[in-house]
Image (cartoon, rainbow, N blue to C red):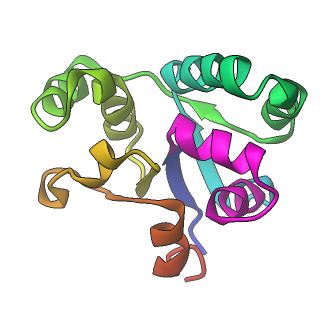
């Protein structure tokens, strides 16, 4: 069975840490079991760190533990992907989308509506919420 390469937006990481249940937590659990290959970028790490420090400081130890326990692959966007992403999404989210394009993932998983509104015919992967991904059954095949 081929492992599914997923790009995680910071919103999924934060939600997965903050809730012991739910789709985001399930995604992190599947990544920990090595059913999924979790891919992020330095931008995702910065966003997640900033938001956890600001809104959920009690979860910082859990956040640090997550990075010790999961085999995250950290990818940075190349210029070609940045140009393509800039034509598809607002400038705030370009680096995230571009990193997913560069990483050649199977899925970009986010809770951010900006990503969920991208024209799916213009990217080579699926985009959805944790629930969309889990309901797809792609990781079971």
Which span of residues is magenta-colored?
8-30
Q: In the current view of this chain or complex, which residue is farthest to the front? A: 55
Res. 64 visible in picture: no
Q: Going 14% across and 55% down the picture, which residue do you hit?
A: 119
Q: Is residue 118 left or right of residue 140?
A: left
Where is residue 66 shown, x and y percent of the image?
A: 81, 37
Identify whether 32 is placed above or below 46.
below
Res. 72 visible in picture: yes
Where is residue 95 shown, x and y percent of the image?
A: 34, 23
Residue 48, image quadrant: top right
* Residue situated in front as seen by the camera: 64 or 1: 64
Q: Quadrant of the C terminus?
A: bottom right
Q: In the current view of this chain or complex, which residue is farthest to the left? A: 87
Give the main secondary structure, helix, strand or loop, of the magenta stretch. helix
Where is residue 130 shown, x and y percent of the image?
A: 53, 62
Identify whether 56 is placed above or below 30.
above
Identify whether 5 is placed above or below 22.
above
Q: Going 41% across and 58% down the picture, which residue do you hit?
A: 106
The reply to whether the magenta stretch includes residue 9 is yes
Where is residue 56 shown, x and y percent of the image?
A: 75, 29
Identify whether 9 is placed above or below 128.
above
Q: Is residue 18 left or right of residue 94?
A: right
Please tell me how many numbered marks the rendered image carries: 0
Residue 92, image quadrant: top left
Q: Going 28% across and 43% down the picture, which residue do you hit?
A: 114
Q: Is residue 13 left or right of residue 44?
A: right
Q: Going 67% across and 18% down the picture, which residue do you hit?
A: 54
Q: Quadrant of the N terminus?
A: bottom right
């Amino acid at each position: 069975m081929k492992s599914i390469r997923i790009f995680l937006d910071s919103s999924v990481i934060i939600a997965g840490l903050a809730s012991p249940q739910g789709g985001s937590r399930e995604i992190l659990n599947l990544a920990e079991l090595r059913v999924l290959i979790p891919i992020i970028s330095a931008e995702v790490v910065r966003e997640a760190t900033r938001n956890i420090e600001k809104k959920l400081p009690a979860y910082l130890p859990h956040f640090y533990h997550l990075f010790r326990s999961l085999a995250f692959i950290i990818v940075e966007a190349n210029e070609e992907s940045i140009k393509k992403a800039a034509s598809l999404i607002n400038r705030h989210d370009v680096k995230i989308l571009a990193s997913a394009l560069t990483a050649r993932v199977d899925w970009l998983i986010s809770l951010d509506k900006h990503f969920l509104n991208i024209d799916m015919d213009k990217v080579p992967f699926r985009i959805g919420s944790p629930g969309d991904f889990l309901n797809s059954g792609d990781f079971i095949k």
